[in-house]
Amino acid sequence: MIKGIQQLVLALSLLSVSIATLADSPKIQFHLSGADLHWIAERITFNETANKPENLTFWNAKELFPSFGIGHFIWIPKGVKVPYEQTFPQMVKFVSKTVPAPNWLSSLKPMMPPWVNRESFEKEQNSNKMKALRHWLLETKDDQAAFILHRFQLKLNEALAKLSITDQWKVKETVELMAAHKVSTYALLDYFNFKGLGNNSKEQYEGKGWGLLDVLMAMPSVSKHSRLEVFVATAKDLLKRRAMHAPTQKQRDIEQKWLAGWYHRLDSYLKLTTKPL
């Protein structure tokens, strides 16, 4: 009897610790001013579209799906299997709460690309539907940046909950240090949009990723003065490791060529700190 009571007390104690741990689990949440959000939106737009309106509706010849908007949000056709999360329908739903999407787009049930392939997509680039879509995408750049911020916080907090408490607080502290300045905040959001969060096992080589969470976890301790430099250096290390460990020699050769462009994008974050903001 006594032994049974002792076991019950122990179980209740462990339960209390677990509940307290959950209650203390850190959450990442920050807000941007309208001016800062606009500033970030303009830079993401340049990175993904080179400020060319026609690139707001784009289907790369090497990809199985089109992408849209300032973040090149992907829209996956029926029957296509890729290891990426579809983000365009999510963005449309989010932004439409503020600025309604073109009728033809919002009326799609289900919301799937109306083009069977890239050829049919290219033929419609100058159609009224596509022009209306590009106009909406141009008018809602700041709202799309707000969606990137919303998704960044949602996905990062979901991933944090699966880490140890020690790692949770490490990531939270690093993010909050970076979020104290709009350039490093932009770096977080742009890298997240550019290389993903990194918690998708299908986007890893030999069990190692290169997404935002991978970078944050690999970063050594930072101060408010070194945060961006350390972030960039760590991201470069992980992307170099990615190129070295691609599954085939052909893919390794391709990714070695991509490294220069990836490094250039990361270096562009640092250049912003030496210019008037």
Image (cartoon, rainbow, N blue to C red):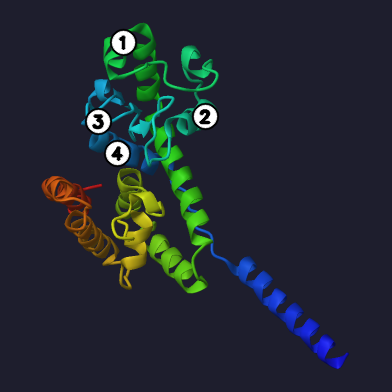
Q: Earlier in the sequence, mark 3 or mark 4?
A: 4
Given the image, on which type of amino acid does mark 3 rest? Thr
Give above or below for 17 relative to 112. Answer: below
Numbered disc in front, either 4 or 2: 2
What's the residue at 39%, 10% (across, down)?
A: 129
Give above or below for 107 relative to 41. Answer: above
Q: How many marks?
A: 4
Give the CA distance from mark 1 to mark 2.
Answer: 23 Å
Which structural element holds mark 1?
loop
Which structural element holds mark 4?
helix
Check disc 2 and report the residue beneath it: 93
Give the CA distance from mark 3 to mark 2.
Answer: 22 Å
Q: Position of residue 1 (x, y in %)?
A: 88, 90
Check disc 4 and report the residue beneath it: 44
Relative horizontal placement of residue 212, taking residue 244 as reference (left or right): right
Which structural element holds mark 3?
helix
Given the image, on which type of amino acid does mark 2 rest? Lys
Give the CA distance from mark 1 to mark 4.
Answer: 26 Å
Whether the residues at callouts 3 and 2 have beta carbons within 8 Å, the answer is no
Would you identify the image quadrant in which residue 71 lies? top left
Q: Position of residue 245 (x, y in %)?
A: 21, 58
Q: Residues within 10 Å of mark 3 (few under 14, many from 20)?
A: many
Which dot marks residue 124? 1
Q: Residues within 10 Å of mark 2 (few under 14, many from 20)?
A: some
Check disc 3 and report the residue beneath it: 49
Is residue 230 something one can see in this rendering? Answer: yes
Given the image, on which type of amino acid does mark 1 rest? Glu
